[in-house]
Amino acid sequence: MLTHHYSELLHFHNALRWLVLLSGFLLIIGCVVGKLQGLAFKSTGRRLVAFYTSLLNCQFLLGVLLSFASPLVHTFWANPAAGMKSHDLRFFAMEHTTLMIAALALGHIASARSRRAPNDSAAYTTALKWSAASLALILAGIPWWRPLLG
Protein backbone atom coordinates (compact mmCIF):
# COMPACT_ATOMS: atom_id res chain seq x y z
CA MET A 1 0.00 0.00 0.00
CA LEU A 2 2.76 2.48 0.93
CA THR A 3 4.67 1.80 -2.26
CA HIS A 4 1.64 2.95 -4.28
CA HIS A 5 1.73 6.29 -2.48
CA TYR A 6 5.51 6.66 -2.31
CA SER A 7 5.65 9.53 -4.79
CA GLU A 8 2.93 11.51 -3.01
CA LEU A 9 4.53 10.94 0.40
CA LEU A 10 7.90 12.01 -0.97
CA HIS A 11 6.43 15.22 -2.39
CA PHE A 12 4.75 16.02 0.91
CA HIS A 13 7.94 15.23 2.85
CA ASN A 14 9.86 17.51 0.50
CA ALA A 15 7.38 20.38 0.90
CA LEU A 16 7.22 19.96 4.68
CA ARG A 17 11.02 20.33 4.81
CA TRP A 18 10.62 24.02 3.99
CA LEU A 19 8.17 24.54 6.86
CA VAL A 20 10.55 22.78 9.25
CA LEU A 21 13.44 24.97 8.11
CA LEU A 22 11.36 28.14 8.31
CA SER A 23 10.11 27.27 11.79
CA GLY A 24 13.68 26.48 12.89
CA PHE A 25 14.99 29.81 11.66
CA LEU A 26 12.02 31.63 13.22
CA LEU A 27 12.71 29.84 16.50
CA ILE A 28 16.34 30.94 16.47
CA ILE A 29 15.40 34.53 15.65
CA GLY A 30 12.64 34.45 18.26
CA CYS A 31 15.04 33.21 20.92
CA VAL A 32 17.56 35.95 20.18
CA VAL A 33 14.89 38.67 20.14
CA GLY A 34 13.13 37.27 23.23
CA LYS A 35 16.36 37.16 25.20
CA LEU A 36 17.48 40.64 24.11
CA GLN A 37 14.10 42.20 24.81
CA GLY A 38 13.51 40.32 28.05
CA LEU A 39 10.27 38.74 26.87
CA ALA A 40 8.55 36.06 28.88
CA PHE A 41 9.56 32.65 27.50
CA LYS A 42 6.09 31.18 28.01
CA SER A 43 4.43 33.66 25.69
CA THR A 44 6.95 33.55 22.85
CA GLY A 45 9.67 30.96 23.17
CA ARG A 46 7.58 28.04 24.29
CA ARG A 47 5.19 28.47 21.37
CA LEU A 48 8.05 28.66 18.88
CA VAL A 49 9.72 25.56 20.33
CA ALA A 50 6.41 23.68 20.33
CA PHE A 51 5.72 24.61 16.71
CA TYR A 52 9.22 23.53 15.64
CA THR A 53 9.07 20.20 17.47
CA SER A 54 5.56 19.51 16.17
CA LEU A 55 6.71 19.99 12.60
CA LEU A 56 9.80 17.86 13.31
CA ASN A 57 7.55 15.09 14.63
CA CYS A 58 5.35 15.19 11.52
CA GLN A 59 8.37 15.23 9.24
CA PHE A 60 9.93 12.32 11.12
CA LEU A 61 6.75 10.23 10.89
CA LEU A 62 6.58 10.89 7.16
CA GLY A 63 10.23 9.90 6.88
CA VAL A 64 9.57 6.63 8.69
CA LEU A 65 6.72 5.85 6.30
CA LEU A 66 8.92 6.73 3.35
CA SER A 67 11.70 4.46 4.57
CA PHE A 68 9.32 1.49 4.47
CA ALA A 69 8.35 2.31 0.87
CA SER A 70 11.66 3.64 -0.46
CA PRO A 71 13.25 1.64 -3.26
CA LEU A 72 16.61 3.14 -2.27
CA VAL A 73 16.34 1.94 1.32
CA HIS A 74 15.11 -1.49 0.22
CA THR A 75 18.00 -1.83 -2.22
CA PHE A 76 20.48 -0.83 0.48
CA TRP A 77 19.20 -3.39 2.99
CA ALA A 78 19.08 -6.15 0.36
CA ASN A 79 22.89 -5.91 0.20
CA PRO A 80 24.31 -3.47 2.79
CA ALA A 81 27.95 -4.10 1.83
CA ALA A 82 27.28 -3.06 -1.76
CA GLY A 83 24.91 -0.32 -0.57
CA MET A 84 27.70 1.32 1.43
CA LYS A 85 29.59 1.88 -1.84
CA SER A 86 26.69 3.83 -3.38
CA HIS A 87 26.39 7.46 -2.25
CA ASP A 88 22.59 7.66 -2.69
CA LEU A 89 21.86 4.29 -1.10
CA ARG A 90 24.17 4.94 1.87
CA PHE A 91 22.92 8.50 2.30
CA PHE A 92 19.21 7.67 2.48
CA ALA A 93 19.50 4.39 4.38
CA MET A 94 22.11 5.51 6.92
CA GLU A 95 23.31 9.12 6.91
CA HIS A 96 20.01 10.95 6.35
CA THR A 97 18.21 8.71 8.80
CA THR A 98 20.85 9.04 11.51
CA LEU A 99 21.15 12.82 11.17
CA MET A 100 17.39 13.33 11.26
CA ILE A 101 16.89 11.11 14.31
CA ALA A 102 19.61 13.09 16.08
CA ALA A 103 18.02 16.39 14.96
CA LEU A 104 14.65 15.24 16.30
CA ALA A 105 16.23 14.30 19.63
CA LEU A 106 17.96 17.69 19.91
CA GLY A 107 14.68 19.46 19.11
CA HIS A 108 13.00 17.61 21.95
CA ILE A 109 15.90 18.37 24.27
CA ALA A 110 15.42 22.06 23.40
CA SER A 111 11.78 21.80 24.38
CA ALA A 112 12.28 19.86 27.61
CA ARG A 113 15.28 21.76 28.92
CA SER A 114 13.91 25.20 28.09
CA ARG A 115 10.70 24.40 30.01
CA ARG A 116 12.77 23.54 33.08
CA ALA A 117 15.11 26.53 32.86
CA PRO A 118 15.24 28.65 36.03
CA ASN A 119 14.32 31.90 34.27
CA ASP A 120 13.28 33.33 30.91
CA SER A 121 16.78 34.32 29.84
CA ALA A 122 18.11 30.83 30.52
CA ALA A 123 15.11 29.31 28.75
CA TYR A 124 15.82 31.33 25.60
CA THR A 125 19.52 30.47 25.75
CA THR A 126 18.77 26.78 26.18
CA ALA A 127 16.18 26.71 23.40
CA LEU A 128 18.53 28.62 21.11
CA LYS A 129 21.51 26.33 21.74
CA TRP A 130 19.70 23.01 21.27
CA SER A 131 17.46 24.18 18.42
CA ALA A 132 20.42 25.60 16.50
CA ALA A 133 22.19 22.25 16.87
CA SER A 134 19.05 20.47 15.68
CA LEU A 135 18.72 22.79 12.69
CA ALA A 136 22.41 22.35 11.81
CA LEU A 137 21.92 18.57 11.65
CA ILE A 138 18.84 19.01 9.49
CA LEU A 139 20.74 21.24 7.09
CA ALA A 140 23.56 18.67 6.95
CA GLY A 141 21.11 15.84 6.32
CA ILE A 142 19.08 17.36 3.51
CA PRO A 143 19.81 15.90 0.08
CA TRP A 144 20.54 19.25 -1.55
CA TRP A 145 21.47 17.60 -4.86
CA ARG A 146 17.90 16.38 -5.38
CA PRO A 147 15.00 18.54 -6.59
CA LEU A 148 14.27 21.21 -4.00
CA LEU A 149 10.59 21.38 -4.92
CA GLY A 150 8.41 18.55 -6.07
Image (tube, helix red, strand yellow):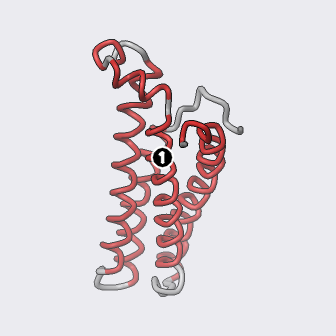
| Image quadrant in which you'd find residue 84 | top left
Q: Amino acid at mark 1?
A: Leu
Please tell me which residue is depicted at 47% across the width and 22% down the height of the picture: 88
- Residue hosting label 1: 65
| Image quadrant in which you'd find residue 137 | top left
The answer to whether 39 appears left or right of 98 in the picture is right
Please tell me which residue is depicted at 62% across the width and 56% down the height of the picture: 19
Q: Residues within 10 Å of mark 1 (few under 14, many from 20)?
A: some
Please tell me which residue is depicted at 36% across the width and 60% down the height of the picture: 130
Please tell me which residue is depicted at 52% across the width and 78% down the height of the picture: 47
Up-down relation of residue 83 to residue 118 (above or below) = above
| Image quadrant in which you'd find residue 8 | top right
Horizontal and vertical percent position of residue 58: 51, 59
The answer to whether 2 appears left or right of 108 in the picture is right
Horizontal and vertical percent position of residue 52: 51, 64
Horizontal and vertical percent position of residue 50: 48, 72
The answer to whether 26 appears left or right of 45 in the picture is right
Up-down relation of residue 149 to residue 59 (above or below) = above
Element assignment for label 1: helix
Horizontal and vertical percent position of residue 124: 42, 74
